[in-house]
Image (spheres, rainbow, N blue to C red):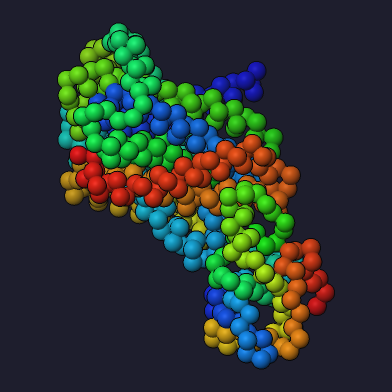
Amino acid sequence: MILSDLLGSDVVDAHGRRLGALVDVRLEVSGRPRQLLADTVVVGILVSPRSRFSTWGFERRDEHAPAIVARPQRWLHRGMFLVDWRDVAVVDEGRVTLRDGAEHLDPSLREAPRSH
Amino acid sequence: MKRLFSVALGILTAIGGFVDIGDLVTNAVVGSRFGLGLAWVVLVGVVGICVFAQMSGRVAAVSGRATFEIIRERLGPRAGLANLGASFLINLLTLTAEIGGVALALQLATSVDPLLWMPVAAFGVWIAVWRARFRLLENVTGLLGLTLIVFAVALFMLAPDWNALAGQALQRGTPQDEPVATYWFFAVALFGAAMTPYEVFFFSSGAIEERWTEKDLATSRLNVLVGFPLGGLLSIAIAGCAAVVLLPASIDVTSLSQVVLPVADAGGKVALAFAIVGILAATFGAALETTLSSGYTLAQYFGWSWGKFRRPAKAARFHLSMIICLFVAVAILATGVDPIVVTEFSVVFSAVALPLTYLPILIIANDREYMGDRVNGRGMNAIGTVYLVIILIAAIAAIPLLIITGGGA
């Protein structure tokens, strides 16, 4: 599976209720840097309730500039949350199902889960 | 002293490097139809390219990433590929126009048919890209391009009615004998000519080629902020010459010989020789920049090793893609299409493609993860936002205006 298969998938909770769309995944460096890139592991998925549009990276930090881009981005992705990869139960084509009681985490980077 | 010299050299090459076939043709066309009535667009375009070049240079120097690496990282592979496709095709169109421009300049000098000069021009560009050092390319073409100052000299020698010229420049609204849509079509074309995207690919990739660090930013800012406005003045001088000689005679600019007609009129053969050298240097320099830009954009998107600081064998795909682009450009020109028409289309489509590269740079220039504390300040963001709006309006309006006016006919 490659990332493109996941992006844009519907994310549903354990009861099949739609929570939003998977707009990005969060990676963490897990190994030593190699020639081009270090090994990474998926630690979570970003779910946006109202939009499948790219976040252009505005979710990672509290960026407000330039306002002409940041404001519409923030509005488009209001209510966005991060789900720990361990809370993902099933990954189907175009549909990702979460475990019961999956926690909705703050998507900004400082709050991201660091241990796994 | 050495530093002073390097600053002076940078400014001079920025002046010479600002003007290319798009500026030459569009300014002459606009001058011959509207006088200096659209000179304000050159001012808007010059400030815009200063803002854009300054931001992309800072992003390149601080983050160490060139424009298309950033676009791919930030927009993702799919949106990035669509962006690459549009930007690359328009750059190829500009490259075609520049090679055509080199051939037309050589035709002016030798009276040999431009079709025969086109392969020679492409070969010259290839050998320079393959063998010559980056600095050398920039400096030689930039300095020789300074001979275009002859357009400003010619304008003075023509002893125009300065009040009338100033009146044209300050006139509000469209001239009565031209439709409103045509006026705005040429405004967009002139804006596209001043703010061509390749200038930014080249500028930001060049920053990485020359291994800029944050320390070099002050020099680069000076080069841009002094060099580009002076280059803009040259553009206005070209329009001014056309306004004084071609407008009263109702001569429409459809060839390069009409662009240089006022210069020959004012200064005779010597002035004409300077103009031809200047046009040759400006178009050849721009042909080099667009050729390199085509290689840069592809290599940066696909992650190939790139750069003139590597030996060609170490950046094989980068060099091969540039060779193919040169072949394609010559093939387009070999169909017998008029290079002036190609140029007119290329500046309009440049305006269409501009937001595709401007927006990612504006976003990254605000991203602390890439930029640390060198993110845009409030003032820079204010002017950056104003230009985002202008660029979007020009991009959206360009194609409808092209269709309504039938290409400004």
Locate residue B2: give its quadrant: top right
Q: Residue at x 38, y 21 (%)?
A: B170
Residue B315 horizontal side relative to residue B160, left or right: right
Residue at image location 53% in from the left, 50% down from the top: B359
Looking at this view, name the residue that lies furthest to the right.
A115
Which one is in front, B308 or B176? B176
Q: Nearer the viewer, residue B169 or B244?
A: B169
Q: Is residue B15 above or below residue A110?
A: above
Q: Dividing the picture into quarters, in which one does residue B169 lie?
A: top left
- The front one of A101 and B215 is A101
Quarter holding the C terminus of chain A is bottom right
The mark total stands at 0
Residue B292 appears at what percent x and percent y? 44, 46
State whether residue B219 is above or below residue B318.
above
Q: Position of residue B380 (x, y in %)?
A: 62, 38
Residue situated furthest bottom in the rendering = A15
Query: Could you tell me if residue B258 is visible in this image?
Result: yes
- Please give the name of the residue rendered at 64% of the width and 23% of the height, measured from the top-left corner: B3
Residue B297, placed above or below residue B260: below
* Residue B141 visible in this rendered orientation of the protein: no
> What residue do we see at 64% from left, 36% from top?
B379
On the image, the x and y values in percent for residue B308 come to 51, 45
Q: Quadrant of the N terminus of chain A?
A: bottom right
Residue A103: give x, y in percent of width and height: 76, 79
